[in-house]
Amino acid sequence: MEKTKTGKQKPAYGMASNCAFMISRAWRDAKSVLLICAGLIVCTVAASLLELFVTPMILDAVGRGVSPGELTVLIAQFALGLVCVYSFQAYLNANTLFGRVCVRRMLAVEQNLLECCTAYPHIEDPDYLKRLAEAGRAHSTNNDAGEAVWNTLTSLTSNLVSFAVYLLLLSQAGPAISLLTAALAAAGYFAGERIRSWRYRHREEEGRLRRMSDRIVYQSQSPKLAKDVRIFGLGPWLLQLYDKYTQMFEDFCVKAQRRYLWADLLDVALALLRNGAAYGWLIALALRGELSPAQFVLYFSAVGGFAQWVTGIFTDLGALHRQSLDLSTLREFMAAPEPFRFEDGAPLAVKPGHLYAIELRDVSYRYPSAKADTLSHVSLAIRPGEKLAVVGKNGAGKTTLIKLLCGLLDPTEGLVLLDGEDIRQYNRRDYYKLFSAVFQQFAPLPGTVAENVAQGGDVDRERMWDCLERAGVADQVRTLPQGENTHLGRQLYLDGVELSGGQMQKLMLARALYKNGPIVVLDEPTAALDPIAESKLYQKYHELTRDATSVYISHRLASTRFCDRVLLIENGGIAEEGTHDSLLELGGRYAYLFGIQRKYYAGSADLKGVADHE
């Protein structure tokens, strides 16, 4: 968004542009939306004109002394016309929802695809997440711009056409009455709209109160917090918080309703003034004999309708403006540039059997809004087929280093090279295909075991079972109620199961093996395990990744003895580098930390070799 002279943000797309955008989307996704809108406009204008002329035409016929039969035919014609118009209008209203939902759904699908496929830095960017939430308002429910805009456009066009017809009609009684009615109707709208728009101007406050109460409800129902709520007796406190924000929201609504009451009273006062002046003018013309009874009734009815169209036009323009702001937010989100190259990047095909070299050349990285670099001027070359261990205390920058290697982040300074080439030139999704990763915070999907291992619905069963066997979790999968077809998690499926932390970590290892990427990355996937179990699992990783370039992260130093090289990360840089044995012999920081951790595994038979080494 651009900024105006007052410092407020100006939407990148205007009202006309957003209307054209929605019309083009409807033409592409559901042409019935436009056809039905056109039909509703015709029906609305036709019904308005029939209702306006029915009484004056009957009075005129009576004044001319037509026969009862002719009068009956005239009344029947008007009645039939109204029945046909209202019937067709009801039919269109009954069928208008389907196309509008289709257009809104396609907008939602496009936004969701962008959200799923956007560059990783966006996921950690609070500004991006805020813009994402704001963009979702345009298509979140049928009360928002994605659908309501069609009602507004239909109503606005109907009001404009009817206004033109009524203006032409009232001008025959004199321009003064048209100008007076239009001016007072416009004054009433602008005076009342300023009051009614108070809630819209305070929508962020309303949204915050809604989010807080909804968040408390979600947290109180979350299975992850169920134990804490019960053990620590958090129920009364959560209820107190919910009552607090509910009361604040009720107070907000009371403020809004008080303003709406004043707006309604103002409407009544201006309507009395407007209609009184117009009706007085018409009565004066009738008393002077300048209007026939039929003309008097016609103009008398037209005055109320004319004011209605004027007010309707301004009301619809105000609603369209608000909906346009939401649509502009959505379009700005959809058109936002990506920090990485995707389809416009150079293709990068995985070479079977090829072992890749990765290099960080004088790399620094600072997170947005951070005051210091997390990593500073790090240079690291990972040889093809090398097994590299990265160790250090929590917060030292190990995970940031892995994100840079995997291409999830681009360095603030320096280069990440693949076989000597800058990775920024490549299609980043092609680059991701090189990596089989198990992260500390892994994400099993609410699907079957087989779908989680194969990362989708097309499962090679033989290959899947081979990966499960190699990961050491096949026996556990066989004992599940439906084997590999068992659903994971209970968020979507009543028959879903919850695996233990160790089982889930092995399942994620099977997923990484199934992908069979030439570069394996393990970012503390065993943090929840005890040192003995972790050592066993890392030994298994080592056996399963003999033919791949591998990077292991762990804050437990003994688990990575089998690696070709160990890096100790401290203070945003590489503090020490070498093999496990050489670093112990060095007697530096690594040896000191190893000595502190040694007591946790020195007495274990499984890790006796580690203890004896020192």
Image (cartoon, rainbow, N blue to C red):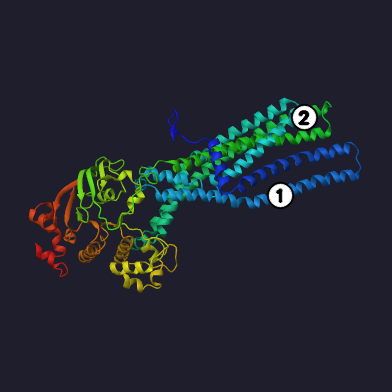
Alpha-carbon span between mark 2 and mark 1:
35 Å
Left or right: where 322 falls relative to 404 = right
**Mark 2 against mark 1, which lies toward the viewer?**
1
> Quadrant of residue 537 in the image?
bottom left
Q: Nearer the viewer, residue 183 or 469?
A: 469
Q: Residues within 10 Å of mark 1 (few under 14, many from 20)?
A: some
Residue 517 visible to an observer of this rendering: yes
Residue 244 visible to an observer of this rendering: no
Q: Position of residue 308 (x, y in %)?
A: 67, 37
> Quadrant of residue 376 in the image?
top left
Numbered disc 1: secondary structure: helix
Q: Nearer the viewer, residue 457 or 476?
A: 457
Residue on which the image places disc 1: 88
The reply to whether callout 2 and callout 1 are in contact (CB within 8 Å) is no
**Type of residue at label 1?**
Phe
Q: Is residue 228 above or below residue 197?
A: below
Q: Is residue 160 above or below residue 220?
A: above
Left or right: where 231 falls relative to 167 = left
Left or right: where 154 falls relative to 205 = right
**Type of residue at label 2?**
Leu
Q: Position of residue 221 (x, y in %)?
A: 42, 60
Residue on which the image places disc 2: 282
Q: Which mark is residue 593?
A: none
Mark sitting earlier along the chain (2/1):
1
Numbered disc 2: secondary structure: helix
Q: Position of residue 224 (x, y in %)?
A: 36, 60
Q: Nearer the viewer, residue 396 or 543?
A: 543
Q: Residues within 10 Å of mark 2 (few under 14, many from 20)?
A: many
Q: Position of residue 412 (x, y in %)?
A: 28, 41
Q: Tell me which residue sits at (51%, 50%) in the image.
A: 106
Quarter of the figure with the C terminus? bottom left
Q: Nearer the viewer, residue 144 or 254?
A: 144
